[in-house]
Image: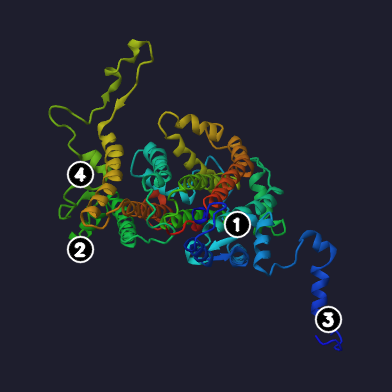
Amino acid sequence: MAATERPTRRSMGDRLYDAIFSNRLWRSIFRSGYPNTPRNQMLAVATNVFLHLHPTRIHRTHVKITHTFCLGGLSFFLFLGLTITGVLLMFYYVPSVERAYEDILRLDTDVRFGQLMRNIHRWMAHGMVLTVLMHMMRVFYTGAYKPPREFNWVVGVVLLVLTLLLSFTGYLLPWDQLALWAITVGTNMVGSAPLLGEPNRFVLVGGFQVGQNALIRFYTLHVIGLPLLAAVFMTVHFWRIRRDGGLAKPL
Amino acid sequence: MAAVRPAQGQPASEAVRGRMRRQREEELLVWPDLVFIEFISAVVFTILLVGLSVVVDAVLLDRANPAVTPNPSKAPWYFLNLQELLLHMHPALAGVIVPTIALIALGAIPYWDADHEGQGQWLSTPRAWANMWVGSIVGAFGTLLLIFFDDGQHAKLYERLMNASGVVANIDGKPNPDFNAWPFPVLRTMRDFQKNFPWDLGFIDLSKPIPLGNLLRTDLLGLPRLDLNVNIPAVVVEQMIPVGVMVGFPVLLSVVAQRRGLAVTRRDHMILQFAGFIATYLMLTVVGTYFRGLGLALGPYTIFAEK
């Protein structure tokens, strides 16, 4: 810049940008600006509590959509979405045989966006069963279960079972004919196991037929027991992916 | 990565440095290349799911009533494959033993096939795609044929073709002598096999229950007397034949594939069996969901018709 040249006035856009991203509040939350150098981009990933699930660098083929179809990430995304919509649904739902069905009816008719929340929760739940199954197929067909990732595959199978159980326990909660009889059919299958079947069914249902005891058991498992267990296994699952050097690479 | 890093204190050789450089060149930064994909994917799926939820409401039927059993009563869709199995075999086998073994086998996959070949790329070993397709097609159509067989569809087809001129099976409630019935009543469905097979072999009548409690005299040991009557036809039809089919057909598939040079390595066999398993699972789920109606008889059905 020549010494005689007067500094140009900053444009409206620049000033707005600074007002939003350079004020004290913003800077106290996000300590650095937009990371636009490779070093800062790596730091952004490594130092952010949410992003540091990721490594800072990743193999070129692993960001191709057709390599993973985002299926594992989508399963996690759906789990988070189900947690959020599930918490909202819990505000309006009482797990008693006298109230449960009426609460769902009220949710669908009286509560603003209630039906929408229930629909999203339902479709996400079906979606999660599908994405978890497809994620398993992706990992199998890309040979990503091979050493050193054997045990992470086993953790994945446990997560598949937990996903099915989460969906199954949620199935009873609307307390309509579909729910009651699907759970009756399902728990009768458990009861047909040799020797331990009937005692197991009794513990699961809390009686000889699906009623109040079954509803409160399924509700408790659905909203706290199984999600906690799934969260623990997910933590191990993600941690091991990182420990094993990210996604499997061809040798 | 650690393998190519030079030991501490020693200068890296030119070759090692070259390898590290090449490996670096194959890598991208997670920010922005992965983080943005994840973000966009999350936004797209949020929009899709909210859109779907605006258009299609979740099913809600009448209030639960233990006194009224709907026909058909179905488990959630992802368990309908097991409910479908239940129609063809002993409940303990279909509801508990088969899924347990399937899950254990699924978990054990990496311990059978620890070879690094074909890792990190879609079906990259030499015969992988062929094995995937053969496994899927045999699994899907084999399952369908078995379901059709247990439903007597082959007998129905035969009778329809042989009586094309419009001869009916019964006239005024009596059997029509001109009707060309399926000539092997034993092989109509598995239930007919159980009912019509000549279980009386002359020297021993297998149709009579065998009182196992009379042989195993647990009462002599001070334990309660076993009230066990083994029904041989039921054991054969509900347990031995299904187990034979579920073990025998996959083994046969692998043997044939091995002979034909389709499956050579362990990974080949794994792909063949896994694809077969997935196809069987899907076919059972689809049939159980959309083709089991009143009384769980074979025919088109959808839950949305209930509303």
C-beta proximity under 8 Å, tags 1 and 3? no
Q: Amino acid at mark 4?
A: Val
Q: Residues within 10 Å of mark 1 (few under 14, many from 20)?
A: many
Mark 2 lies on a secondary structure that is: loop
* B54 sits to left or right of B276: right
* B63 sits to left or right of A32: left
Q: Are marks 2 and 3 on the same chain?
A: no
Which residue, given by chain and number where applicable, does mark 3 sit on? A10
Which residue, given by chain and number where applicable, does mark 2 sit on? B164
Q: Residues within 10 Å of mark 3 (few under 14, many from 20)?
A: few
Which residue, given by chain and number where applicable, does mark 4 sit on? B186
Q: Which mark is residue A20?
A: none
**Separation of marks 1 and 3 at Cα, in angstroms:** 38 Å
Establish if B2 lies above or below B36.
above
| Picture residue at 25% right of the left edge, 32% below the top | B232
Q: Quadrant of residue B154?
A: bottom left
Q: Amino acid at mark 1?
A: His
Mark 4 lies on a secondary structure that is: helix
Q: Kindly report which numbered mark, 2 or 3, lies closer to the viewer in this rendering.
A: 3
| Picture residue at 30% right of the left edge, 15% below the top | B217
Mark 1 and mark 3 lie on one chain; the one further toward the N terminus is: 3
* A181 sits to left or right of B91: right
**Separation of marks 4 and 2 at Cα, in angstroms:** 23 Å
| Letter of the chain that mark 1 sits on in the rendering | A
Is residue B38 in sight in this rendering?
A: no
Q: Kindly report which numbered mark, 4 or 2, lies closer to the viewer in this rendering.
A: 4
Mark 1 lies on a secondary structure that is: loop
Query: Which color scheme is applied?
Result: rainbow
Q: Which mark is residue A54?
A: 1
Is residue A76 in sight in this rendering?
A: yes
Q: Are marks 1 and 4 on the same chain?
A: no
**Separation of marks 2 and 1 at Cα, in angstroms:** 67 Å
